[in-house]
């Protein structure tokens, strides 16, 4: 009889402790400002292109790792959306990770400062909307992502131009020009950046089984803060092959004010959300201990 009681109590314990974290997290506003662009060229080439702002692709920034099995589902969905012409995707790998050779302090700083990097997968669309995890919040991840993509930045009908000229293989000259209505961004500071992206790299030791990892952001360089300009930049080495690309991106961040910012303390809410499970575990543990003591005596 004692064994039956103990087994039943243990089953109840398992039912309590196994239910946390099942529900999907709803998308959230990053609060960091828009990010757009996506024009690109091969770093070993010379190129010039002009694109209307309203035809730029939605930018998807994916925080990932080569050991992250949940990331595989997310990345396959992003790949399908990119193949359909709905987004341009970029993969940011965790820095200082013993099982992921693709991350760097430079790219980690970008993602963490804008979006608070945590455990992958995390996907951010157009710099403004973030969805964490691989569980759909709605009917499917595709529907979730399309809903976020559909939140237009309303950039207007102007143009953006990217010109790139490879120099000696180690450096290149980038020029840009954007016909932006800056009135809609008066609460933000703009920085113009080039992202160096390796088209794909092979890493068979990755435990998520992908082996080939595409669109790896290897380095971000700020080249200016005006709507037009020219800069000379150094080209990073590829992990393997000769497939480095340069991408033009416009970052916007909120202008800091001198007013004190009130930071809400959510630690109590976070702790209290886990208390029911903890108290239930403690209570049931006491019941088990009492039952064992009773039958032993």
Image: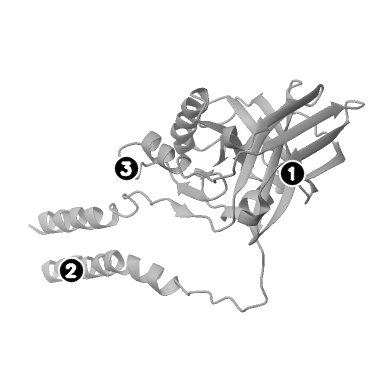
Of labels 3 and 2, earlier in sequence is 3
Determine which of the numbered discs, if any, sits on residue 193 in the image.
1
User: Where is the C terminus found, in terms of image quarters?
Assistant: bottom left
- Asked if residue 214 is positioned above or below residue 106 in the image, the reply reads above
Mark 1 residue element: strand
Q: Position of residue 72 (x, y in %)?
A: 47, 32
For the residues carrying marks 3 and 2, which lies nearer the camera in this image?
A: 3
Quarter of the image for residue 195 reads top right
User: Where is the N terminus found, in terms of image quarters?
Assistant: bottom left
- Asked if residue 93 is positioned above or below residue 253 in the image, the reply reads above
The residue that mark 2 highlights is 287
Q: Is residue 6 visible?
A: yes
Query: Residue drawn at (78%, 26%), measured in percent from left and top?
Result: 48
The residue that mark 3 highlights is 138
- Asked if residue 54 is positioned above or below residue 116 in the image, the reply reads above
Q: Position of residue 41 (x, y in %)?
A: 74, 26
Determine which of the numbered discs, if any, sits on residue 278 in the image.
none
Q: Position of residue 67 (x, y in %)?
A: 54, 36
Q: Residue furthest right?
A: 168
In the displayed structure, does residue 121 sit left or right of residue 173? Answer: left
Mark 2 residue element: helix
Dot 3: within a 10 Å radius of its alpha carbon, few (fewer than 14), some, or many (20 or more) residues?
few
In the displayed structure, does residue 262 sit left or right of residue 266? Answer: right
Dots 3 and 1: beta carbons under 8 Å?
Answer: no
Dot 1: within a 10 Å radius of its alpha carbon, few (fewer than 14), some, or many (20 or more) residues?
many
């Amino acid at each position: 009889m004692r064994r039956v009681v103990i087994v039943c109590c243990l089953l109840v314990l398992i039912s309590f402790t196994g239910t946390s974290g099942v529900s999907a997290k709803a998308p959230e506003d990053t609060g960091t400002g828009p990010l757009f662009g996506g024009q690109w060229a091969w770093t070993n080439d010379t190129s010039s292109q002009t694109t209307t702002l309203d035809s730029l692709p939605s930018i998807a920034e994916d925080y990932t790792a080569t050991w992250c099995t949940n990331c595989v589902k997310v990345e396959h969905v992003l790949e399908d959306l990119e193949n359909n012409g709905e987004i341009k995707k970029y993969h940011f790998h965790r820095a200082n990770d013993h099982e992921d050779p693709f991350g760097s302090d430079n790219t980690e700083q970008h993602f963490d400062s804008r979006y608070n990097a945590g455990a992958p997968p995390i996907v951010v669309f157009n710099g403004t909307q973030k969805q964490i995890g691989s569980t759909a919040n709605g009917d499917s991840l595709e529907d979730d992502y399309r809903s976020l993509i559909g939140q237009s930045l309303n950039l207007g009908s102007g143009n953006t131009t990217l010109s790139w000229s490879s120099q000696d293989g180690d450096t290149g000259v980038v020029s840009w020009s954007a016909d932006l209505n800056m009135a809609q961004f008066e609460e933000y500071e703009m920085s113009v950046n080039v992202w160096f992206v390796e088209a794909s790299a092979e890493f068979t030791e990755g435990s998520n089984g992908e082996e080939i990892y595409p669109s790896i952001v290897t380095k971000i360089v700020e080249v200016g803060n005006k709507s037009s300009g020219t800069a000379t930049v150094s080209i990073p080495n590829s992990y393997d092959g000769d497939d480095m690309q340069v991408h033009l991106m416009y970052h916007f961040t909120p202008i800091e004010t001198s007013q004190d910012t009130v930071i809400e303390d959510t630690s109590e809410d976070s702790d209290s959300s886990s208390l029911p499970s903890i108290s239930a575990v403690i209570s049931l543990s006491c019941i088990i201990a009492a039952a064992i003591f009773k039958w032993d005596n």
